Amino acid sequence: MHTPIVHRGPDGEGVLLFDGRETSQFHEAGAVPADSASSVAFAFRRLKIVDLTDAAAQPMSSVNGQYWIVFNGEIYNFASLRSQFAASG
């Protein structure tokens, strides 16, 4: 399901697999082992528009790696949120 949408996000890709015990992240779908098994899998295609750095690559994890997100969309008020979070430390 990841390959047919390459045109929707030609600037990057990511895959996350979770088997109930361990999380494995791959920066290319072709790097996922053919014999891998997982309970949950996320795949993402990226189109760089606002943040052109690798810091915006997905799937994204929390600092401790416990939480993961795949986000398809734009946060329209990101500038005001950034200012608000920077002001609060």
Image: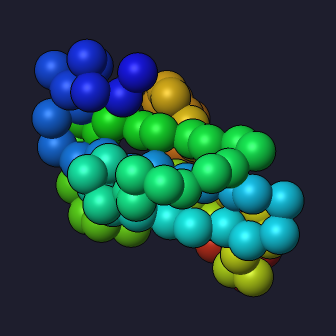
Image side of residue 46 versus residue 86, left or right: left
Q: Quadrant of the N terminus?
A: top left
Q: Name the residue located 75 percent from the left edge and 82 percent from the top edge.
A: 64
Decide if residue 74 is in sight here: yes
- Front in this rendered view, residue 21 or 67: 21
On the question of residue 79 being in view, the answer is no
Residue 2, how many percent across, how many down? 36, 28
Residue nearer the viewer, 64 or 19: 19
In the rendered image, residue 6, in percent from the top left (x then y), is placed at: 20, 26
Left or right of 11? Residue 69 is right
In this view, the residue in front, 4 or 83, is: 4
Depth order, front residue of 83/69: 69
Q: Residue at x 40, y 59 (%)?
A: 33
Q: How many marks?
A: 0
**Residue at x-position 61% and y-position 42%:** 41
| Residue 23 percent across, percent down from the top left | 67, 67
- Locate the C terminus and report the quarter of the image it occupies: bottom right
Up-down relation of residue 34 to residue 3 (above or below): below
Q: What scheme was used to colour the molecule? A: rainbow
Q: For the view shown, which residue lies furthest in the front direction?
A: 35
Residue 24 picture location, percent across and down: 57, 67
Up the image or down, 53 lies above or below 63; here it is above
Q: Is residue 15 left or right of residue 70?
A: left
| Vertical order, 33 against 39 (above or below) | below
